[in-house]
Amino acid sequence: MSEKAKFFSRSLFFLITISIFLLILSSFSLVQFPSNHFIPRSVFKLILVNSTSFFLKPNAQTELVKFPFLSSTDTNLSMRCGSLSCRNTNVGASRCYRNKTCGRNQALRKLKVFVYDLPSEFHFGLLGWKGNTNQTWPNVDSHSRIPPYPGGLNLQHSVEYWLTLDLLASNTPKVGTAVRVQNSSQADIVFVPFFSSLSYNRHSKLHGKEKVSVNKMLQTKLVQFLTARDEWKRFGGNDHLIVAHHPNSMLHARKKLGSAMFVLADFGRYPVEIANLGKDIIAPYKHVVRTIPSGESALFDRRPILMHFQGAIYRKDGGAIRQELYYLLKDEKDVHFTFGTYRGNGIKKAAQGMASSKFCLNIAGDTPSSNRLFDAIASHCVPVIISDDIELPFEDVLDYSEFCLFVRASDAVKKGYLLDLLRGIEKDQWTKLWERLKEIAPHFEYSYPSQPGDAVDMVWKAVLRKTSSVQFKRHRKSRHARSEALLKRI
């Protein structure tokens, strides 16, 4: 090869090397550019290394945050405003990446809620509270003045109570998601403060000379009240929020008020045209067992029971599987599968059993969901969900497969299947599920005052995510009305 050819070859090699180096350097630099730069950051944001996705933190540091591999579709979804690309959904979690601009907007965004001042017979009056003349609401500034909710199994469907308390306190300095507004035209959502689950639990039976139960009477009055309101007529109830967590609550009124957004436990007793994921919110039950502090949670070797179930065995519909599993598992030495109620000492026994078990069975009952799942979460007992039609709270932001096991009903009833599956899970695999379970447990705690990321706050955030569809319906409905009003002015 001539000297000229050699020089040309070396020069070309050097030029290519320098070009590749500059390209890599510019790619890393562009990731740090502001989101409004003329070159899209998304072009350079994702670097795939050994089937793993890495995101560069937007804080000008070179620290890399590692995530499980995402497809292009998942990446786009995870990067949308308001969503977290992380395992831990707690605010400020070190493993989270949130787009700077989106995160700032989401933090500032409040759910504006208008609350109907319904008479107390619809809410706190059902708890025996009687206010002074013209007093609609109890004073929530002092815990001692707040009417307590009945204990036992009543508590599991008390969602309406916690949301209402949060709204009543929302005008005081707080860091929650929902804020109460006094003008309905400024609201994202109109809240209907009817304690429907308590009404069903306490007042659905006839007493004395009653011909109509208090529960049915209140629903009839509620329909009359709502359908006469301008707020309801404006959008046909699409922007109204009604809590009907007990599967039998609102039984007489749900069809007439089905255009509203419902807060439910599941869709087990609802036709799809009345309740569906497109418009409604699935909220967790309030667990009735004691919450195990993270530091007291028993490790793998300190949980002698392999799997735990205590409850009603003979159920209707999809719950018939409980009976089949009972006869398959009742004689196994490391399995606790027994009849049980929450009466007497039942709650305490259930809590002790779950806290001593590696896995807790959540089996479909009369409806797809049950409080047992949330008792298991509070006990840090890895849930095994055997309910093919179950809908789960906050599943758009929580990946339940990180802290639960899912087993199809058809597989669970095969002899030996469930035992082989759970006995085959090794200590380190179980520990990974258990660690994540402890991380997400606060999301299922109802509290007053509410805390960032607790169940109350998570429900409001879920409602906030639904408001885009409410706005869509609003805008479609007002297309011609606004144009016609403008033409009249011309």
Image (tube, rainbow, N blue to C red):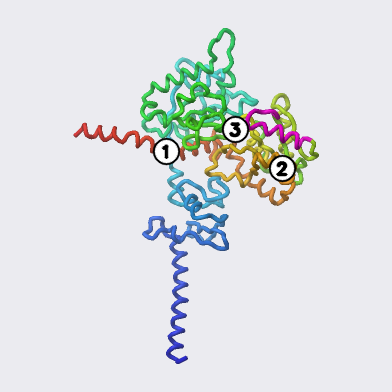
* Percent x, y of residue 48: 53, 61
Q: Are marks 3 and 1 in contact (CB under 8 Å)?
A: no
The magenta stretch spans which residues? 312-330
The image quadrant that residue 186 belongs to is top left
Q: Nearer the viewer, mark 3 or mark 1?
A: 1
Which marked residue is nearer to the observer: mark 3 or mark 2? 2
Q: Is residue 448 visible?
A: no
> Which residue lies under the disc numbered 2?
418
Tell me the CA gap for discs 1 and 2: 41 Å
Dividing the image into 4 quarters, which one contains the C terminus? top left
Which SS type dominates the magenta stretch?
helix
Q: Position of residue 332 (x, y in %)?
A: 79, 39
Q: Which is nearer the N-term, disc 3 or disc 1?
A: 3
Mark 1, residue position: 469
Residue shown at 73% from the left, 49% from the top: 424
In this rendering, the answer to whether 260 lies above or below 333 is above
Residue 184, picture quadrant: top left
Asked whether residue 314 is drawn in magenta, I would say yes
Front-lying residue, 366 or 392: 366
Mark linked to residue 285: 3
Kind of element beneath mark 1: helix
Q: Is residue 27 above or below residue 393?
A: below
